[in-house]
Amino acid sequence: MAGSRSFSRRERVSEQIRRELADLIHSELRDPRVGMVSLTEVAVSADYAHAKVYFSSLAGSDQLDSVLAGLEHAAGFLRTELGKRISIHMTPQLHFIFDQSLERGAQLSRLISEAAAISDHGEHPEHPEQTHHPEHPERS
């Protein structure tokens, strides 16, 4: 029982950290490298010493290094401000990690749409031998 209780508390703390960091980044952070980021998840370690902060960005993949550098540069400031907003025993060190799940989801959706379009048109580009050949009915 105690294990599940501490797990739920850690999840609540993680979500509170995510909300507060999102607000801080939006309202207080002035680094132009960061731009529009969305915090998708925060995972706090069992001892609350570290927090993995997963983010996505509207910036292109060519700007990702710059966005990450801006977040890492602001980590000390964000941690200090976070400590003022939430009351936990220890304010965790922040480790920013790009969350590729939204990008992967968009890529999968695009592939599914392309496959559906090919299917709707009856095209089978990877199996051209399956087209109808009236002169050779056995190949149809």
Image (spheres, grey):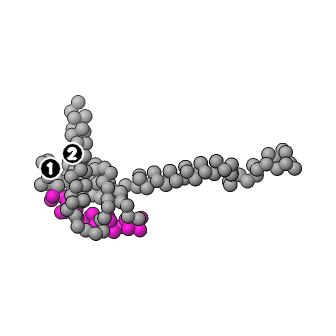
The secondary element bearing badge 2 is classed as: helix
Residue type marked 1: Ile
When asked about the image quadrant of residue 11, the answer is top left
Q: Which residue is mark 2?
A: 13
Which disc number belongs to residue 128?
none
Instruction: State the image coordinates of residue 126 (x, y, percent, origin top left).
Output: 68, 54
User: Which residue is at 41% across, 65% downward?
Assistant: 60
Instruction: State the image coordinates of residue 33 (x, y, percent, origin top left).
Output: 30, 68
Which disc number belongs to residue 86?
1
The secondary element bearing badge 1 is classed as: loop
Q: Residues within 10 Å of mark 1 (few under 14, many from 20)?
A: some
Residue 125 located left or right of residue 139: left
User: Which residue is at 79% across, 45% downward?
Assistant: 140
Residue 79 colored in magenta in the image: yes
Dominant secondary structure of the magenta stretch? helix
Instruction: State the image coordinates of residue 116 (x, y, percent, origin top left).
Output: 59, 48
Ranked by sequence position, the earlier of labels 2 and 1 is 2
Instruction: State the image coordinates of residue 41 (x, y, percent, origin top left).
Output: 31, 49
Q: Residues within 10 Å of mark 2 (few under 14, many from 20)?
A: some
Tell me which segment is drawn in magenta. 61-81
The reply to whether the C-beta atoms of the residues labelled 2 and 1 are less than 8 Å apart is: yes
Q: Is residue 46 visible?
A: no
